[in-house]
Amino acid sequence: MNDAVLDPQDTGPSKGLATISLLSSDERLKGRPKLCSDCGLCDSTLKGRMSSACIFVRNQTAEIEQRLHGRARRPDDERRFGIHRTQYAARMRRPNPQAQWSGIVTSLGARLLEQGRVEAVITTGAAPGTRFKSEPVLARTPAEVLATAGNKPCLSPNLRLLDQVREQGIKRLAFIGTSCQVHMLRAVEAELGLEKLYVIGIPCSDNVTYPDLEYFLTQVSRSPQTIVHYEFMQDFSLWMRHEDGHKERVNYIDFPMDKLHGIFPSSCLSCFDYPNTLCDLTVGYMGAELGWQWVLARTEIGEELFELIRPDLEIGELTSSGDRTRGMPHYIARLTQPPGAKKPPFLVRKLVAYMQRKKGSKGLEFARAIIEMKLLRNLNYVRSKFPRFEARVVPEHVYQTLEPYADTYREVFGRPLASQTEE
Ligand SMILES: Cc1cc2nc3c(=O)[nH]c(=O)nc-3n(C[C@H](O)[C@H](O)[C@H](O)COP(=O)(O)OP(=O)(O)OC[C@H]3O[C@@H](n4cnc5c(N)ncnc54)[C@H](O)[C@@H]3O)c2cc1C
């Protein structure tokens, strides 16, 4: 982490209840669409393709899926998880201690280079002197990919490196990135002149700018400067590991939401692709039990990628327990409250956290629950802040996935869940 003074009293970049967090306040981002996740496309010579490629201008998930798979999503878990051929609980037999989880993603990137299947890997490193500030890296050696292990949990303009790919004459490329980046990449893929493209996706939700990330850590940790690793875990709490090895844990219900809600960019709150459905292989954790990673091979290339790393993997079991549909009506009702609404008393919060851990959804059901919650929250966000964008940025599978909650939605919000164009 850099040397900036992190004062827990600082009200920081959080922008308050009614303000929309827009990145266009940054000089570099002038002229971008109103919703921008700083994917990097506009920093490249492909900038002219922004309006036809950007997920926040027009979500093309259904068309891209048709191209990749020759079909639409089935009316089952594919609506939430995206089209996939196989899914696994897995982890590296010899985990990389620098990795976010066990290091499947960077090991795969390194393997592709070792075997000469690609000439370069676009990945995300840390800016010099920082632990968590993202810096796009065009890695040409296995060691360069391995050096990017671990999350830099802030927006990263990885697609800006497409110019270097062209300039260096790279024809076989692997790309590691978030779902917005992958959407833009797929939209321009045919124009890149590549012979082979491997797309490894990480699930992503509620990303932030780097200053907001630093601010977030001051609000949730007793020692924000010494955090070396953190993750939002499947047990409804945030785990933070510090330089001296000690772990700090904060339950989600204890987050000071009144001070945090302004930090999330409007693009991330208008995103409907948490599981990174347009990549070849998604490597996350949220559908697996604690300690395991969740891997979905979506395409033939995704299966090739999985087979490439399989000898190094321990394969576990995917499980599913709990019932997300019971909690969803409460969640929908809570969406009507301002984010700054008063927190329940300490003992109530302790009980809720205990019950979430004990009785809450686990495994695949946990993934279904949080994906649906984010779809609902973000649909509501678009409807309240950018209503004119709804028809362009909300894909049809969102309404289909949330259909079981349509009655509750109508009761709570006094309007139908279905898209405006259908009404
Ligand atoms: C902001 C963010 C939110 C996430 N939220 C979830 C979630 O809710 N549920 C879930 O299942 N998984 C989530 N993930 C993915 C998860 O935390 C792990 O990154 C993933 O499981 C891979 O772990 P690994 O040990 O295999 O990766 P490693 O081998 O440690 O490699 C990590 C890879 O992540 C890439 N990376 C790091 N930071 C960024 C960034 N800012 N933008 C693009 N790429 C980056 C690096 O290039 C590197 O290749 C999130 C990741 C990020 C960056």
Image: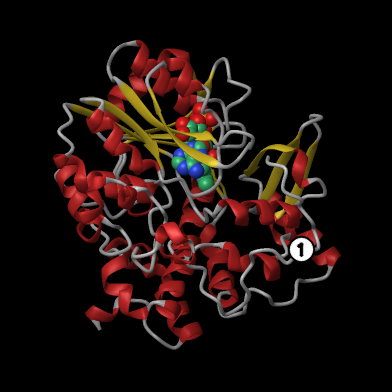
Percent across and percent down for residue 318 are: 49, 35
Q: Nearer the viewer, residue 162 or 204?
A: 162
Colouring scheme applied when the structure was drawn? secondary structure
Residue linked to disc 1: 10
Judged left or right of residue 351, residue 215 is left
Percent across and percent down for residue 346 are: 84, 65
Q: Can I make out residue 283 in this image? A: yes
User: Which residue is located at x 59 percent, y 63 percent?
Assistant: 263
Residue 287 higher or lower than 35, as above or below: above
Residue 91 higher or lower than 359, as above or below: above
The residue lying furthest to the bottom in this view is 414
Inspect the image, locate mark 1, and give the three-letter code of the amino acid beneath it.
Answer: Asp
The residue lying furthest to the front in this view is 27
Percent across and percent down for residue 308 are: 35, 17
Q: Quadrant of the C terminus?
A: bottom left
The quadrant where residue 280 appears? top left
- Mark 1 burial class by Cα count in 10 Å: few <14, some 14-19, many 20+: few
Percent across and percent down for residue 260 are: 65, 64
User: Which residue is located at x 63 percent, y 75 percent?
Assistant: 16
Q: Quadrant of the N terminus?
A: top right
Residue 91 higher or lower than 321, as above or below: above
Residue 422 higher or lower than 80, as above or below: below
Q: Can I make out residue 294 in this image? A: no
